[in-house]
Image: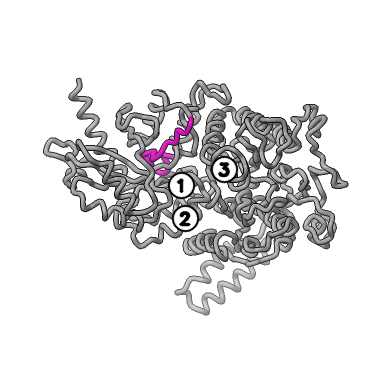
Amino acid sequence: MLRGLIALSRVRFVSPVFRRNIMILASICSLLVPRSSKAYHAPRQHTIVVLNLTRLDSAAVATSEQRAVVWDQLMAASALQGLVNRSRPRLYMLLNGPNGKIDQYWLGKMLAKNWPKDAKYVHMTSVTDVISRFKRSVRGLVVWDPSVPATANAAFTCAGVDSLLPVRYDRSKTSLFWRLTHGGEGQQFPVKVWLVRQNGQPLFTGSGTIPGTHTASSGSAKCDVYLWAADHFLATHRCNPQLMGYYPDGYWINHDTHLPVSRALLSNRDYTVANRGFCFDLSPWADEEPIDDPKQPLGTDYNTLRVVLHDAYNASGGKITTVDGFTPWDEKYTKFTGGKHGGVATEWRYAEILSCYNACMDADAPGLDSMANASYYQHFPLRRKYAQSNLPSVADLKEQGLLTATGLPRPLHYVAVYMGDYDSSAWFYQMTPGFWDDPSRGKLPIGWGFNPNIADRFPFGMEYVRTHATAEDFFISGDSGAGYLNPGYLVKPRKWSDLPSGLRSWEHRCSAYYRQWSLGITGFVIDGNAPPMTDAVKRAYARFSPDGVVAQKIPPLSLVDGTPFIRMSSDLPHDAGQAAGVILGDNRGSAPSFKIYRAVLWSPSDLLNMASRLSADKEIRYVDPYTLFLLAKLELENSANAAR
């Protein structure tokens, strides 16, 4: 009654006298409410703290002391963000791009959408002040050892599992460690986990037994850390075995890599912490000592990686594990940093190993690898389904004059372009703002290869592109499906693991993502060094990707259970004239033909420029991927019928 009276008093057409009388009556009613009753309170306004850390990405990092200070602040802020945002969005960070331009862009889009609804925004710049504000979300500290950089990743895992802040051991009175253990009110936290001895000596030494276990040391302090973490968190099911983060450890602090702190990918780990994931940084190579641990027994990193992935496989019951991150070729493990293997070779070896353990990548590859706020975005509510209403039908092809009187493709060279690579939430996060606002978008058909699992870390961005698409924007899946792996290693023989087939788990995962996002085409299967897709793997893809599949180790054109498979043509050089020349040179001879090319990080203007050069050749028709595959299917079905 009381709520109804108050609401009635606010109706505009009620006279002032009547409104006053109602409020008097409401006041009397409020006095009659028994004290034991739960009084009504309007919901408090949702407050969002916006933490501006853009100064860190431009801070001086010439010395290890400077790098340590910057690292400490961003590490604590990122872990805190994961803890604070675990149940709802409360802390947003500005870091990426000049003056946080990328994070500002997406914040502006959320403000325009009024999400979170009617939120109040408070702006802060001090990490310690933000820690004080959210101290109730923190149970204590986990202290890691800068002399064993791998403990930084173990600290992130501990942070997520036990709601702790990770801090580097440093007893100088200006350090974050000292301030959080000896500071004033709101700045004192108990140390719950020591990954270093309290006198500063290493806990993990690479000899004897691994601390806290009965397991003999691997001979590497670095690898002992991950074996300890796997034993304590994966084998015991205390962390989330379906989420891992392959992110650089604390090596950056003591080695001048000439990289800004954003490239250390600390800000990416808020999502790992929020979802209690497992962090690691291990080389996939068994034939060389890694640059960050050159004295370890040969192959120890590689063997430890397999142990960690096997423990995750067992803990998940063989479900697909997503590993955010990528081989850190800009810091370790490649020719670029003093190793003997190339960057692509290292990526492919890592992909092979992951695939054999039912794991796939959300591939934050160096260069565009930094992302912030995924723990914030994860709460954005998605629809159950996002339709594509612009997909072509046979009737549409007839209307466009692409079919002959007999319903077959006209004898032309049909060309589509796969717009990638968006198998990384970070790449999508950083590049979409410029491309989506490109004035040429909407002027020609574009096949956007957005991996649907990007919606895990960045659901707001995925909905944004779908709800702000033109009739010329077509959506297909990116690298390999709902995550980057090698499908040929989902089935036996699984060279690196010898585990049972993971094909059913992969099909189940992809089917769910493809249904939600109305995807019918897998735009690019990366086979790498894996075996070609078997018939069983192809049939699985035909079920969840019925409109078409693009792969590498397949015939140029084939039909599998009614689904057309097309071999990927070459990667296009990032120059419109050169790319047009490649396509013009490829498309000669008998027609019809059906080809799809890969363009990495092209803008709509780039594509329009190239397509305009192709238009001079009347034998070549540039089309969207769905049109390409529908035409190919009609041609293949006709050929199959003629052969019967």
Q: Earlier in the sequence, mark 2 or mark 1?
A: 1
**Which residue of the protein is positioned furthest toward the bottom in this rendering?**
17
Three-letter residue code for mark 3? Phe
**Which residue of the protein is positioned furthest toward the right in this rendering?**
199
Asked whether residue 52 appears in the rendered view, the answer is no
Q: Quote the CA–CA distance across marks 3 and 2.
A: 18 Å
Crowding near pointer 3: few (<14 within 10 Å), some, many (20+)? many
Place of residue 192 in the rendered image (x, y in percent of width and height, measured from the top left): 80, 45
* Whether residue 308 is situated above or below residue 26 in the rendered picture: above
Q: Tag 3, which secondary structure?
A: loop
- Residue 13 vs residue 189: left or right? left
Q: Name the residue that disc number 1 marks.
A: 422
Judge by depth and name the residue closer to the eye, 483 or 464. 483
- Residue 113 vs residue 72: left or right? left
Judge by depth and name the residue closer to the eye, 564 or 71. 71
Q: Tag 1, which secondary structure?
A: strand
* Whether residue 109 is situated above or below residue 405 in the rendered picture: below
Q: Name the residue that disc number 2 marks.
A: 431
Crowding near pointer 2: few (<14 within 10 Å), some, many (20+)? some
Q: Residue at x 70, y 36 (%)?
A: 226
